[in-house]
Amino acid sequence: MDVLGEGDIRRFLTERIASLLPSQEVDPDRPLEEFGLSSRDAVGIAGELAELLGRELPPTLVWEHPTVNRLAAALAPGAVTASPPVSSSVARAGGSEPIAVVGVGCRLPGAEGPEALWELLMEGRDAVRQVPDGRWEAFDDGSARTSDAIARTTRHGGFLDDIAGFDAVFFGIPPGEAATMDPQQRLLLETAWEALEHGGIAPRSLRGSRTGAFVGISGNEYAHLTTADPASVEAWTATGAAFSIAANRLSYLLDLRGPSMAVDTACSSSLVAVHLAVASLRAGESDLALAAGVNLLLSPVVTMAFDQAGGTSPSGRCRAFDAAADGMVRAEGCGVVVMKRLSDALRDGDRVLAVVRATAVNQDGRSNGLVAPNPEAQEELLRTAYAGLDRGPDYVEAHGTGTFLGDPIEGRALAVALQGRILVGSVKTNLGHLEAAAGVTGLIKTVLALHHGVIPPSLHFREPNPHLPWDRLAVVTEPTPWPRPAARAGVSSFGFGGTNAHVVLDAFPAAARQDEPAARVFVLSDLTADRVRAHAADLAAWAGTEAGKGAALGDVAATLARRAGRGRVGAAVVARDTGELARALASVEPVQAGGRGPVWVFSGYGTQWQGMGRDLYAAEPAFREAVDELAPLLAAEAGIDVHAWKGEGVASLQPLIFAVQLGLARLWKAHGFTPSAVIGHSMGEVAAAVVAGGLSVSDGVRVICRRARLLGSLGGGGAMAVLEAAAEEVPEDLHVAVHSSPVQTVVTGDPGRVAAFAAEVAAHGRMAKVLTAEGAGHSPQVRPLQPALRAELAAIAPGEPSLPFYSTVLEDPRETPTFEPAYWAAGIRRPVRLMQAVMAAAEDGFTVFTELGPHPVLAAPLRDTLPPGALVTHSLVRNAGPQAFEEQVARVAAAVPPRVEGRVTDVPRPRWRRERHWVAAGPRPVGGHPLLGAHVETPAGHCWSTTLDDLSQPPWRLPAEVWHRHGHPVLPIEAVAQLARAALGGPAVSDVALYALLPLPAQITTTLAGGRVEVHAKDAAGVWRMYGSAGEGPSEHALEKMATAGVDGACVGIVTQEIRADEVPVRLADKLVERIWVQAPQAQGGAVPAREWLILADEGDSRAGRLASLVATSPDGDPLLLVPPRPDPLRVMLQVARLAPRGGRLRIVTERAQPVLPGERGEPSGASLRGLVRVLALEHPELRTALIDVDDLSALASELARDTGDDEVAWRDGVRYAARLRRADLPDPPGLPDPPGAQVVREGGGYLITGGYGTLGLLAARWLAGRGAARVVLNGRSGPSPETAAELARIGVAEVVTGDLAASGTAERLVEAATHGGIRLRGVVHAAGVLDDRLITDLTAESVERVWRAKALGGLRLHEATRGAGLDWWVAYSSAAALLGSPGQAAYATANAYLDALCELRRAEGLPAVSIGWGTWAGAAPLPAVAPLTPSEGMEALEALLRRELSAGVVRLDPATAVAVFPRVGRMPYFSMVVEGTAGREDLSALGHDEALEVIAGRVRLRTAGVLGLDAPSLGEGVALTELGLDSLAATRLRGTIEHDFGVALPAGPLLRGATLGEIARMVASELGRGPQEEAGPRDAAERLVVRVAEEVLGRAPAVGETLPAEALPLVAEGLAEELGQAALIDGAATVAEVADAVREWDEREAGRRVVRALTPGTAAPSTARPLFLAHPAGGTTGVYTRLAALLGVPVLGLERLEGTADVSDRAAVYADAVRRTAHAPYRLGGWSFGGILAFEIARQLGDDVELVAMIDSGLPDELAEDELRAAHARRYVDFSRYLSETYGAAVTLSYEELAHLGEQAQLDLTERRIKESGVLEGLSPAILRHQRTSHEDTRAIERYRCLPYGGKVVLYRSTEPTPWAVRDARYAHENDPARGFAPYAKNLEIVPVEGAHHLNLLDPPYVEIVAAHLRGLL
C-alpha cells in the first residue's frame, strides 16, 4: 500500500470536509468545530482516516489536533509527538527589563485609529456630544415614570458612531453568535487586530505563541438585553455576556497560548491590565502581550446613578484642574497596546513607540468612603513606581476626571511624592472618561506623544483650581515639546472602588532609515479577492496624498509584508516610486495565498543564453554584488570572465549558469525571500548546496568548474532526448538520464537507438525532442570521469545542508546528503531524480516552487508532478530583462509573504466590512394581561393595547392553519374570541365577528364598553379600523361569524366566506421596495479579456473622441452607446432594439443623469434608461447590458475593464456605486396634532387626477371625496363612459376636463378647473398611462411614442403646470416594472423610470413629489412573481406614503417565484438584497425513467398552467400550447420556470412552433438523460456515416449495435468507398459499430500520415485552382469533410490534428506554417465546429494573405465567471457520465453535487476515476477512446482561447435547429446570437443560415449540398 504523505492527508481532509459542507470554503488553519461538524462527523472522519492509513487511530483525534493542517502534520509519516518547546525567554526574562510598546489600536469618540486620535489631540478637538438617537430605547419600557427618568438623565458623553457594526465574516463568527456577543467583545477583536497590524505583526502569525491577553472590562449592559427574555436565550448567550470571554475569545480566535484574563477594577481596569501584562512579559510567561480596555455606554442606568451622586458634569465638559470643574463626562471606546520585551523587539526589528520602565498597583483601603480617593494611597503608588528609577516624570497623564475634589487630591499627591516641576494633562478633556478603557486611552495618548516628540494640549483649562499646588504643576494647554530628549512620562488611573495604577514610560529613539533597493514588493492579503482589491484602491489613493508621498517606500513595503497573512487571498505588486505603486495597485489581480515555501529548484544545463544576467547585473545591486564576489574565484579556477556574459561549451557555460543562479539567490533574498527547501537538477545541485549551507562558495566554484571541465572532455559518442513518456516505458537498451515528471523523461544512449525510440514516441502523437549534447551525461559514458572528479575534489570541505535539501542523486530524496567528492561523482553518473524530489517536497506540504536559472525549463515537469493548486514560478526569461524577475517576485510574494527589510511605518490598514449585529429586543412590557396587554380605564369603558406577532407561541398557542390564510399570518376569529373572553373576565362569549383580515404582526387595541368587545387597529396610513367584535351590537358585513366561544376554548358555529389568495392582505411594510445606490468597489468582478468597443454617439459629440482614447475600439466591437446630455429616450430605445439581435455586450453611458448622492438633481431623460436596462436583463440576458452614469469619462476605462455583473453603475469623484433593490423601511409618520386624514387631504381643497376614468383614478377620487376634498378634477383623453359618469356623479365633487395631457395647454386647463372660484389646489395624482406590450426587438416608433406620451411627457407637462402652485403633495403612479423589469414592457418601464426620476428632480428643487411603483392591482394583467394588490391595500399605501413623503415600490413580490420564473434574477447583484438565489431543483436520481418522466410532466403541467392562467388538470398532453395562447412572452416565462426547476434551458423555437405538453416533458427528460431507454443512436461522425450508407442499402436506419446482413456488407463497403474516396478495410466487421471502428481506424491511419491531408483525388492541384484548407473538428479527423470536398470542385486539403494539448493559437501557428509551405497566397481556409475556430485563428495569423474563411457552425463559448464556469464543467461531466451509462450500458455514478465545489482538475480527476471504476472503458474500442480524449482536449483548448479581431472576409454557415447533443453545454447554445460569439471579432462577417439543419448533421445530406453550393460560389 502506498504511504500517504502530509499533502495527501491534507487533500483528503479538505475534500472530505468540503463534501460535508459544500457551501463553505475549507480553511486548513480553522478549527474543524467552526465548520459546524458534529461529534459524529468528527468520529467518522477519524474512522475514515484510520482505514485510509491502515492503522488504528483514537476517536478523539480531531480534538487533539483541531485543524486540517495540524491533523495532517500529526498523521504524516515520521511525525513524532513532542512537547511544545519552552521559550528561552523564561531564562533570560528579568524583573526590570524595559518593555517596548510596539503597536497601538484604538476606537474612540471622534477617532478611529491612532493616526486619527493624534490628529484630534493636536487640533484640540472635543469629541463629547449628545447621546446618539435610539441608544437608550431598549431600556425604555414606555412607562411615564421611566420616560421621565431618562429625560432627566445627563445626555452628554463621548460616544462612538456605530456600536452595532461588526465584521463577523472576517472573524468567522456566525451572525447569530455575533448578535448575542457583547459588542464590547466585537469592538475588542477589531481593535486588537488593528493594534497588531499597527505594530507590523500579522495576527495569524501568533498561532500557538506565548501571547498574553489582558483586558480591562467592567460593564455588561448588553447582557440585560440578551437575557431579558428567557425564551430567547441561545447557546451563545452565556459566552456573549461573560467578562472572561472578552479576553478568552481573543486568545481563541488567534490561538494565543499565554495568559488570558479579564480585569475589572472599574476605572483603572485597563491600566491594571497593562501592569499584569508587563509582569507576565518580565516573568517570561508571555513573549508578547496585548493589554486592552473596552467600555460601552448602552444603558442610561449608570449615568442616572452618577447623576444622583453628583458626579457628572451638567455642562457636558470635562474641565480637569480648572476652577470651574463640575464633574466627569462618561465615554466609551476601546484601546489596545501591544508589548514585548525591549530586547525581543529590537531583535525582531519592531518599531518601538515608547518603553515601559515601571508599573505599580495598590488599593485605597478604608478611605473616606467606598468611592472616595485616598491621598496617602496615591502618594504611595507614585513612590513605588519611581522607587528604582533615577528621576521622576517630565509629564503625567493624570486620571484627571474634572471633579472639584478629585483633581486637587491627585495634584497634591504628585507634588508630595515626586520631585521637580511636572507638566500634567488629561485626555478626558478631549474624549470624556472611558472608565474601564480610560487608563489604556491615557497610555496610548502618552505613547503617541513620546513617539512624536510633542505633548498635546488639555482642553477647557481657563482658571486654575485654587486647591492645587501650582508652584509644582503646570497644565499643558498648547502643543508643547518635551523638556528633554530622553523624555519620561507617567500615566495614572484610579478605580472608583479604590484600585490605583501608575505606569512609567520613557521615550525611545526611532530607528535609522536604511538604504532602499531599486524595486520593492508590496504585499496585500485578506479574506476575499474583493477585500484585497478594496484595500489596494485605498492604498493607491493614499499613495497620492502628502502622507503617502512622504513615506519611505521601503518602510511601506516592509510594513505590508509584516502584516501579510490576513486571509487566504493575496496580491503583490513591484514598484519603484509612489506613482508606479498607485498604478500597479489599481489593477491588482488577487490569487490564492497561504502557500508553503518557496522551494528553490536550481535548473541544470541547457538554460543558458548569451548575455544571460547582464541586464540584472546593471539593474540590481544584490545580483551585482554576488556576481562580483564570484568573478575572481571563477577567473582563478577556470579562467572564466563572468563579466563577459558569454561562453562556449559545457566547461564555460555551466560555471556561468552557476554564477547566475547564486546571483539570483542573492537577489531573491534581497527581496525578502529565503528558501524553505532546495532542489538541484543535475549541475543545479552545486548552487543548491551552496545556498543550503552545505558547501562554501569557493568550494562550490571548484565543484562546478572541475565537474564542467571533465564533462566537456567527453567528446560525443552518446545522445539524449526529452520524451513525453514515463520512465517505465524506456527500453532496456537505453538509460534514463532524468526522471523529469510522471509523463516526461530524458533518455540517453546510442544515438541511433535514441533517435529510433524518439520517433516511436512521436508516432503516438507525443512530444519527442532529440537534444544536441556534447556527451551523454548521467549515463555509463561518464563512468570513466568519476575517479578523476573524486580526485580533483579531494580538497573540498564537505558539509551537510542547514535547511531541507531534496536530493536528486540519492534514491531517497529526503536522505540528508554529505557534499563530499563521492557525492558529486555519483551525481554525474546517476539519473537525476527530479520527479521524486519534487514529489517528496509536495508530500511534505510545500506548495510554492521557484526555478532559479537563466531561463525556465522545468515549468512543465514541475506542473506535471505537483498536485493542483501548487504555484510554479521562475526567475529569468531569455532576453526579457529585469521586469520578468519582478513579475515573478510579485507572484511568489502574493502566495508567501517576504520578510522585507525596513522600518514599521503608518500605512492604511484594510477596512472592516461591518454589518449590523444586534439582539432583537422589543420594549419591555409595563405589565398587564398576558393576552390583552396594558390596560387603561376610560369614561367609556376599558381599553387594552398589545402587539400580536407569532400566535403559535404562548399565551396563544394557535395552530398555524388557524391564523394563516393562503400562507399569510392574519388575525383569526379564534383570537378575537379569546380576546373577548379575556376582556369580559373569562365567561363564554357569543356573536363573535371578524370584519376584515388584519395582517400580522400588528398592534391592536381591545375595548370593552357596555358588554360589547371590539378589536381595533390603526393601519399604516394612521386610520383606525375595526377588525373584530363580540357580544352585543351589530355585526353586519362580517367576513366570518362565530356563534359562541366556550370557557373551554371550544368555538361553535363558525360561518366564513371564501377568501381568495389575492384577497389576503399583507402588511405595507412587507410590500415596500426601493432602489438605492451602494458603494461597490470594482473588486467584485474579473477582468474581461481582449474586449473591444464600438462607440456609438451623436454626430459632433466631442466626448466620443476622448472615450476612444480610453478604451480599445473596433468597428465590430461590442456596442458602447454614449448618450447625449439630454437624450431622447425614445430614440435610444429604438437604437437598442436594433442592437439587441447583434449580440455581444451592451453598455449605455450617461453623464450625471442619475441622482446618486444626496441633493443631486439628476436628469430624468437619461435616468429613465434604467427602466430599459431592467427589461433587457430579463429579455436579453446574453447582452449583459449595463447602464453606466459617470461624472468623468475617465472612469469608464476602469469600469469597462471588468464585468462585475452590476447592470446599473455610477461613478462619483472616483467612487463606484451600484444600484440595488431592497426592502424599504416604513418609518413612523411625523407626529401632528391634526386627525390623520387631515394631514393628507385638506377639507375644502382642490385636487386633480390624470387617468381619472381608470380603476385607480376612480379609487383616488372616492378617497379624496371621502376625506373632505371640495373639488376633484379628473382628466382623460375623451369623455367618460356612461357607467363612469354615473360613478362620478355619486362621488359628488368630481369634475371632468378632457384632453391629451401631453398636448400643450391641457395641464394648465386642469389646474385652472381645480382652482376655479378661489379653491386652492392642494394635491395632484398623475395616474395616466397607456400599455403597448411587445418585446424589445419588436418596438416601433409608434408603439414607443404611444406609451411615452401619456406617462412621461404628460407627467412633465403636469410638473411644469403645477411648479408654482404651492402643493401639499404631487404623486406619480409609477410601475414596479421600472424597478423589477417586466418582459415585453421596455417602453412602459422606461416611461415609468422617467417619472421616478422626475419626482427625484422635484424633490431636489424643494418641490413635493412622491413616486409609487405599483405592482399589479387586482383585475389587471399579472406581472410574473407579483401578487395583485387589493383596492384597500392600495389606498392604505397611497395615504401612508403621502403622510411620510416617501417614494417606494408597493408590490407583493414573491422572491422565490421570481427566481423560479427568471432564474438569472437570483444571480443578479441588483436583486441580491431581495432574493437569495435559486431554490433546489427536482431530484430525479432515484427514479426510473418512466417515473421521472411522470414527475417532469406533472411539474411542466403546473408551470404551464401558471403561465397561461389555466387549470392544470385541464391541460392534456397532446394539445399544442400555441393553441392555448402561448406567445413569445409566455414562452420566455415558461422556459425560465423549466430552467429553474430542472436546470434545463429549452430553445424557444419548438415551443412557439406548436410543441405539446408531452413533447416538452420528453424534451426536458431527454436533456436530463431521464427519457425512456432507447437503442443507442450514432455517436460520432464515423457511426453517422455508416448508418447513412447502410440506410441507403437497407431502406431503413439501422441501430448502432445491429448486425448487418451478410449480403448487405459488400454494398455498404462499396458505398463507404465512394464516400471516402478509397476503400476502407471492413473485413471481419458485422455490426454497425464494428464497421464504424474500421472506418475510424482507416481514417486515423490516413490522418496520421501527415499534417496536410489530400481530401480530393490527386494530391497536386492544377496551377490555376487554389486549394481550400479545412481544419479538423474537435476530437476527429478531416475525414468528416470527404462528402463536402467532393462537391466543391476545387482541391481540398485537410489540416489534421497535432498531438498534445497545445492552445488554439499555438496549433494555428503550426498550421499557418504548413499552409505557407503547401500553397501560394491568397489562401482559403475553413472548418466545421472546432475546425472553424482553428481556421479563424490561422487566418488571423496569416493576415492579408487570406481571402476567405468559411466556418461551418463554429461558435465561441459564452464567458462565465469562475463559479459559473465550475458549475458548467460539473454539469458537462455529469451529462457525459450519463451519456456513457445510457449509450454503453455501464453504471457511471456521478452527481452534480459531488463536482460543484471542486476545482477544475479535481472535477476531471473524479470523473475519470468514476468512469474507470464503471468498467465502461473495457468495452470501448481504442478509436472511440481516442475520440473522447481528443474531444475533451480540444474543448478545453477552446475554453482557454482568447479570440482577437480579424478583418478579412468570414462566412459562417449557421444551423437553425436545436442539436440533439449527447452532452449539452449551454455556453455554446447562442440562441439569441446569430454570430455565435464571433460578432466582436469577425469584422467582415456574413452569416448564412442553413434552415432545418442542426450542428451534427450540417455535413450530411441534404444540408451538406446547401453548404457546398454556397461555398462553391465563393471559391
Image: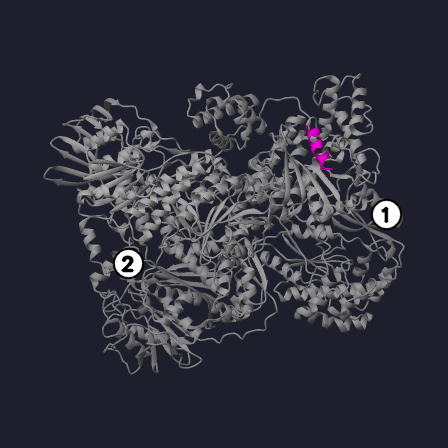
Q: Give whichever of 837, 1112 is nearer the camera.
A: 1112
Provide residue 1664's location: percent of width, then percent of height. Answer: 81, 40
Residue topped by disc 1: 755
Crowding at label 2, few (<14), some or many (≥20) Cα neighbours within 10 Å?
A: some
Crowding at label 1, few (<14), some or many (≥20) Cα neighbours within 10 Å?
A: many
Label 1 – label 2 distance at C-alpha? 87 Å
Q: In this view of the protein, can residue 1004 be seen by the observer?
A: no
Q: Is residue 470 above or below residue 224?
A: below
Q: Is residue 1777 above or below residue 82?
A: above
Provide residue 600's location: percent of width, then percent of height. Answer: 68, 59
Residue topped by disc 2: 131
Residue 940 sits in quarter: top left
Task: Count numbered badges in the picture.
Answer: 2
Q: Secondary structure at mark 2?
A: loop
The verdict on residue 1914 being magenta is: yes
Provide residue 588's location: percent of width, then percent of height. Answer: 56, 56
Q: Give whichever of 1097, 349 is nearer the camera.
A: 1097
Provide residue 561's location: percent of width, then percent of height. Answer: 55, 62
Q: Is residue 147 above or below residue 982?
A: below
Q: Give whichever of 236, 112 is nearer the camera.
A: 112
Q: Quadrant of the C terminus?
A: top right
Q: Which residues are magenta?
A: 1903-1915
Q: Residue at x 48, y 76 (%)?
A: 509
Q: Amino acid at mark 1?
A: Ala
Tell me, for residue 489, which label it has, or none: none
Q: Is residue 1795 left or right of residue 1737?
A: left
Q: Quadrant of the N terminus?
A: top right
Q: Amino acid at mark 2?
A: Val
Classified by dominant secondary structure, the portion drawn in magenta counts as helix
Q: Is residue 894 above or below residue 1669?
A: below
